[in-house]
């Protein structure tokens, strides 16, 4: 046996690595080295058991995890061997398999992946066609219904047959039309990648994958949904050698279809399975683990019990704090972060603020900005969600498939073609009647004056001009490099000039810089064969997630939800807003299974901390313009007081408490490092209108660009004179804006 492969593994890890044949479930507690086990198991198969690398399949949930696994494989086996192993996410692997064999189940030879924005545009078109009321048929509601059906492997016919109420029948019509438009566009959505792969595995094509993959490894098995579960079972029937790693205590994605029962019934699905528990934690101090253990031990629904043990005993005590309100909580967390950095105990990037919902981030963003503490908001405006990037991608996708209606509609809007809503409605009506794509309609409009008879005069001429422009681009970009395609679009559409016209020169140039960055990314695909460059580029962009882009080398505080923090770790973690109605979330209170998932969310948050953990709540919280007293999270009663420092700040749980001034902060350094903050009371609101000139204490002078009432408070968008500040969206009552000139 090659010693370096198993060197440094603990007893449980070594058992998991050396359990070669048959089904194996490795129950991996947080920080127990599951990625190490997966990679060393693969190295063991190749290095000690002469398994051909191409016969191994490793499935992850994120691109980040896949990259990390491949990097470690290069270190263990060398780059040449590592590249021969199939490693990827469920969705990226499914896309790869469908590129290879999708035509066997009716997919076109070239197809596109629709992202969330594309799907919503399609649904808006459908609900308009069907004349459905906005409520409850919002794009998100309709897509949630369709996604849930697909994740449960329910097709249109089955869903329609089971529809009883008028509302569900309307959803069924949306589902049917949605699938039809996807087919016409030659597109699939994310759920289809899995659904179509299952369809593929029901054909003779499965025999190829059975012969290809003799050893299958799956990471984060507790997060699999029904479709992923069926994919794994179908593949494992051929190999029999199925190794899954997961932790039912960290199953937190039930809201998107993950089923914790999949991991809990593994030994029933695969009789004779070995179950190996990995409980030795290499991340957190024992003090942190004791808090996590007491929380999860109180769950009445656990199947597999693990006792987490740290490499070393002791550590700093976990702190618990109650603050007067969310602004006070944010200020005090900033105090602690500043002390960590000033005292030399860590960098900004060693700190993470974690919360249950994205809406909780605002108070922390404002406090961090006021202190000039650098931070990154995971889940904020993503690069690939910027409007100019979406617009450019729409044109690129049209070059891959001109029948992609969603992209074509976006291309009509930018650069502006002058084809208005009424003209688009005429074309929509015609293509719906003729069951064809927009591109087919445009071609007919150019070639046949009688086509789309409702469209006449100047509107028809503008549509013809757009169609001719599109056709010129399609002719220019056939069998040329991706960068040639990119540049042809920029030139033909006058993209840069259009940005300046739409957004003004300064903002337009800034947005063009983003487009230039997209072009740089496209340049990374030039080593591929020309006929693969565009499709691979579009496919991989569609599969990138926000956490995958998180740059851990930058020195900034990370603001992130507990869901998004899964798989990450930080020296210093602040778990904030631990209140009933937030954690557990108010929507889960009536469902015991959902409440237990909320418990697991808190468990995941706690176990992200390496050295220090601070948990806190606000005694009152601003809601619709009024302060409401809160109740501490019910989960806190399951954590013994002896495990928490500074618990004598009033009732921790179970009773509503009035906001009180805070004592000196006593965690993570000397008490003298901080002063008590009194409850923050917002000043009386001022009335602001578009055009008013205002002054902000830190950002300086600016002009109000927009103003609207949100939750009984005034939300304004201000363009500040300082270009480094730019535009800011602010809540007027807390921004302390001073009006220095009115527009009236």
Image (cartoon, rainbow, N blue to C red):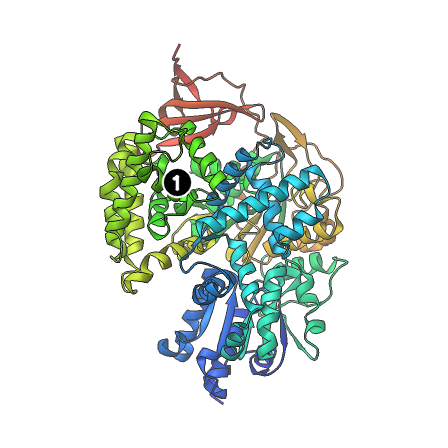
In the image, is 727 to the left or to the right of 321? left
**Image point 43% across, 67% down: which residue?**
100
**Image point 52% across, 48% down: which residue?**
180
In the image, is 412 to the left or to the right of 358? left
Q: Where is residue 256 in the image (x, y as percent from the top left)?
A: 60, 52
**Nearest the eye: 433 or 193:** 433
**Nearest the eye: 311 or 177:** 177
Above or below, comparing residue 212 to residue 736 in the picture: below
Q: Position of residue 294 (x, y in %)?
A: 71, 59
Q: Where is residue 707 in the image (x, y as percent from the top left)?
A: 46, 22
Above or below, comparing residue 182 to residue 625 in the picture: below
Does the rendering let one see residue 222? yes
Q: What element carries label 1?
A: helix
| Residue behind mark 1 | 441
Q: Where is residue 539 in the image (x, y as percent from the top left)?
A: 41, 56
**Image point 55% across, 44% down: which residue?**
177
């Amino acid at each position: 046996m090659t010693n370096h492969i198993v060197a440094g593994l603990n007893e449980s890890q070594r058992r998991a690595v050396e359990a070669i044949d048959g089904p194996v479930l490795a129950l991996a507690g947080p920080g127990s080295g599951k990625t190490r086990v997966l990679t060393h198991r693969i190295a063991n198969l190749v290095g000690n058991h002469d398994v051909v690398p191409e016969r191994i399949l490793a499935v992850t949930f994120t691109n980040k995890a896949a990259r990390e696994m491949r990097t470690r494989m290069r270190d263990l086996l060398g780059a040449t061997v590592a590249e021969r192993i199939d490693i990827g996410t469920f969705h990226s692997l499914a896309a790869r398999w469908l590129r290879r064999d999708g035509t066997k189940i009716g997919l076109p030879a070239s197809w596109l992946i629709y992202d969330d924005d594309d799907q919503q545009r399609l649904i808006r078109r459908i609900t308009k066609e069907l004349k459905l009321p906005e409520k409850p048929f919002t794009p998100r509601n309709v897509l949630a219904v369709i996604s849930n059906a697909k994740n449960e492997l329910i097709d249109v016919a089955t869903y329609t047959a089971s529809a009883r109420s008028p509302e569900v029948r309307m959803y069924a019509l949306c589902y049917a039309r949605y699938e039809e438009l996807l087919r016409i566009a030659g597109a699939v959505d994310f759920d289809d990648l899995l659904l179509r792969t299952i369809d593929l595995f029901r054909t003779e094509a499965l025999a190829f994958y059975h012969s290809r993959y003799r050893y299958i490894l799956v990471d984060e098995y507790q997060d699999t949904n029904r479709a992923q579960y069926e994919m794994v079972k179908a593949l494992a029937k051929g190999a029999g050698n199925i190794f899954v790693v997961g932790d039912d205590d960290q199953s937190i994605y039930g809201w998107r279809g993950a089923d914790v029962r999949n991991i809990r019934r593994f030994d029933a699905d695969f009789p004779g399975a070995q179950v190996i528990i990995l409980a030795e934690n290499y991340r957190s101090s024992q003090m942190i683990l004791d808090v996590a253990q007491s929380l999860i031990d109180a769950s009445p629904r656990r199947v597999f019990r693990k006792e987490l043990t740290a490499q070393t005993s002791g550590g700093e005590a976990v702190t618990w704090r109650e603050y007067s309100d969310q602004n006070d909580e944010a200020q005090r967390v900033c105090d602690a972060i500043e002390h960590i950095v000033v005292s030399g105990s860590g960098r900004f990037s060693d700190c993470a603020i974690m919360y249950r919902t994205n809406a909780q981030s605002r108070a922390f963003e404002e406090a961090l900005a006021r202190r000039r503490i650098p931070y990154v908001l995971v889940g904020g405006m993503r690069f690939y969600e910027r409007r100019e990037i979406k617009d450019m991608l729409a044109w690129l996708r049209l070059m891959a498939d001109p029948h992609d209606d969603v992209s074509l509609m976006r291309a009509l809007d930018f650069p502006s073609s002058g084809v208005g809503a009424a003209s688009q409605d005429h074309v929509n009506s015609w293509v719906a009647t003729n069951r064809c794509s927009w591109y087919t309609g445009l071609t007919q409009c150019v070639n046949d004056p009688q086509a789309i008879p409702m469209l006449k005069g100047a509107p028809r001429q503008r549509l013809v001009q757009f169609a001719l422009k599109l056709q010129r681009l399609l002719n220019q970009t056939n069998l040329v490099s991706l960068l040639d395609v990119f540049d042809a679009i920029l030139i033909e559409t006058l993209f840069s000039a259009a940005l300046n016209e739409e957004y003004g020169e300064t903002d337009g140039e800034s947005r063009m810089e983003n487009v230039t960055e997209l072009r740089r990314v496209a340049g990374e695909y030039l080593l591929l064969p020309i006929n693969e460059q565009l499709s691979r580029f579009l496919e991989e962009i569609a599969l990138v997630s926000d956490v995958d882009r998180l740059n851990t080398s930058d020195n900034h505080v990370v603001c992130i939800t507990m869901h998004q923090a899964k798989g990450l770790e930080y020296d210093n973690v602040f778990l904030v807003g631990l209140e009933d109605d937030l954690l557990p979330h108010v929507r889960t209170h009536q469902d015991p299974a959902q409440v237990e998932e909320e418990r697991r969310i808190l468990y995941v948050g706690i176990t992200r901390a390496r050295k220090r953990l601070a948990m806190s709540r606000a005694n009152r919280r601003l809601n619709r313009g009024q302060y409401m007293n809160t109740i501490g999270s019910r989960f806190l009663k399951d954590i013994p007081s002896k495990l928490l420092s500074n618990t004598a700040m009033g009732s921790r749980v179970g009773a509503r408490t009035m906001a009180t001034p805070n004592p000196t902060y006593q965690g993570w350094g000397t008490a003298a490092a901080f002063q008590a903050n009194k409850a923050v009371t917002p000043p009386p609101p001022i009335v602001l209108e578009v055009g008013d000139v205002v002054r902000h204490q830190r950002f300086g002078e600016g002009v109000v660009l927009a103003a609207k009432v949100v939750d009984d408070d005034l939300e304004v968008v201000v363009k500040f004179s300082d270009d480094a500040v730019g535009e800011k969206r602010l809540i007027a009552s807390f921004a302390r804006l001073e009006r220095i000139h009115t527009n009236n």
